[in-house]
Amino acid sequence: MNVLVINCGSSSLKYQLINSDTEDVLAKGLCERIGIDGRLVYQKAGCDKEITEAAMPTHKEAIQMVLDALVNEKTGAVKSLSEVNAVGHRIVHGGEKFASSVIITDEVLDAVAECNDLAPLHNPANLIGINACKELMPGVPMVAVFDTAFHQTMPQKAYLYGLPYEYYEKYKVRRYGFHGTSHSFVSKEIASFLGMDLDHSKIIVCHLGNGASISAVKDGKCVDTSMGLTPLEGLVMGTRSGDIDPAIMEYIAKKENLDIAGVMNVLNKKSGVEGISGLSSDFRDLVDGMNAGNKRAEAAVEVFCYRVAKYVGAYVAAMNGVDAIAFTAGIGENAGLVREKVCEYLGYLGIAIDKEENAKRGDNVVISTADSKVKVAVIPTNEELAICRETVALVK
Ligand code: AMP
């Protein structure tokens, strides 16, 4: 079966067409600047990228262009649209309504729309993508895969904030967590890679990308995660602050003469390692800066790694132990220095890192030494493949 995986943002749309039998990517790309001017990037497997500038007033035109590219006589990945058997949509927020992926029906669309308040930038864009596909591919089954679903197994003690309980009842204020598709995929992947029994395991997944989060996965189920009501909580990220003293918001608002939107803009877009370093949100630049003697770049990397290590410690406590730790996403997969620094803090767990293995890149790799008490591995995430698998499981 061929599954079209769609990840729709407010002005962009990423896609992959995956053959679910072989799990090969047949074609992939993205539409950018939707509603502004429009740009399609399309790449058939084994071929060069093609870039087409064309008007995309709405997501409907963007998806139409993707479908046209997929069946293009010369460069298409399939002969006709009848070979696209299902569509899997990434949805950011499923609130408490969705603890797993679901086939999209009108009722599901209404329920997703009810979560719009919780993710006002993302959910409406996800819905636009679904509606455009519905119009252009009538009858093709579609599945919604939620970023929050995997974390719905968290116990109340992990998801309730120390706030008036009625905010939870009235406004659904609680920890939801994000990157769930990745945490789910990577926890399963590390268990199978290391020959562990997922149902009797304690795994910590460090998803360290521009957005970063950690989760504690016990017996295959999430028991805690670092992001909260929104993706702002937890680790220090590319441009997000992660955990701060909430009173800083009022203090900064007064000092800088900012309203709530202004403070939120600082916390989401001007903080994190970029805010600390004043240099960049990208770890490649930070590591280069550090090596060139830039003290603020060094401070940013140190703060980032220390926060990751603190969360790992917290989740070891939450699960009363840990069997394996996985590093994934852009930084987790590529920045050996970050992995090494984080693991240096974890010596008390009997963790030791093999520097040669830690320097490797690419596939799944164990980076802990043979006598390390906890296995540590780099496990590349693949959210599109995870969405494809979820889609097939429901559609078949
Ligand atoms: P993601 O959000 O998972 O796509 O991760 C993106 C981030 O990964 C970038 O902003 C970089 O900070 C980081 N990254 C990507 N490649 C490398 C690399 N080779 N070395 C260090 N960091 C990297």
Image (cartoon, rainbow, N blue to C red):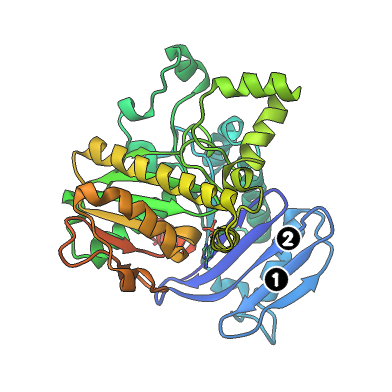
Quarter assignment of residue 224: top left
Q: Residues within 10 Å of mark 1 (few under 14, many from 20)?
A: some
Callout 1, which amino acid? Val
Q: Is residue 394 above or below residue 81?
A: above
Q: In the image, residue 1 lies at what x, y percent?
A: 45, 71
Ligand 1 located in image quadrant = bottom right
**Is 313 positioned to the left or the right of 374 in the image?**
right
Q: In the image, residue 360 lies at what x, y percent?
A: 38, 74
Q: Residue at x 26, y 67 (%)?
A: 193
Q: 258 or 183, which is in the foreground?
A: 258
User: How many marks overall?
Assistant: 2
Q: Residue at x 73, y 56 (%)?
A: 60
Picture disc at residue 32:
2
Q: Secondary structure at mark 2?
A: strand
Q: Is residue 213 above or below residue 110?
A: below
Q: Earlier in the sequence, mark 1 or mark 2?
A: 2
Q: In the image, residue 305 lies at what x, y percent?
A: 43, 49
Q: Is residue 198 above or below residue 17?
A: above
Quarter assignment of residue 67: bottom right
Q: Residue at x 71, y 28 (%)?
A: 261
Q: Residues within 10 Å of mark 2 (few under 14, many from 20)?
A: many
Residue 9 in sight in this render: yes
Q: In the image, residue 82 lies at what x, y percent?
A: 58, 72
Quarter assignment of residue 327: bottom left
Q: CA distance from mark 1 to mark 2?
A: 8 Å
Query: The C terminus is located in which quarter?
Result: bottom left
Q: Which residue is mark 1?
A: 41
Q: 270 or 278, which is in the foreground?
A: 278
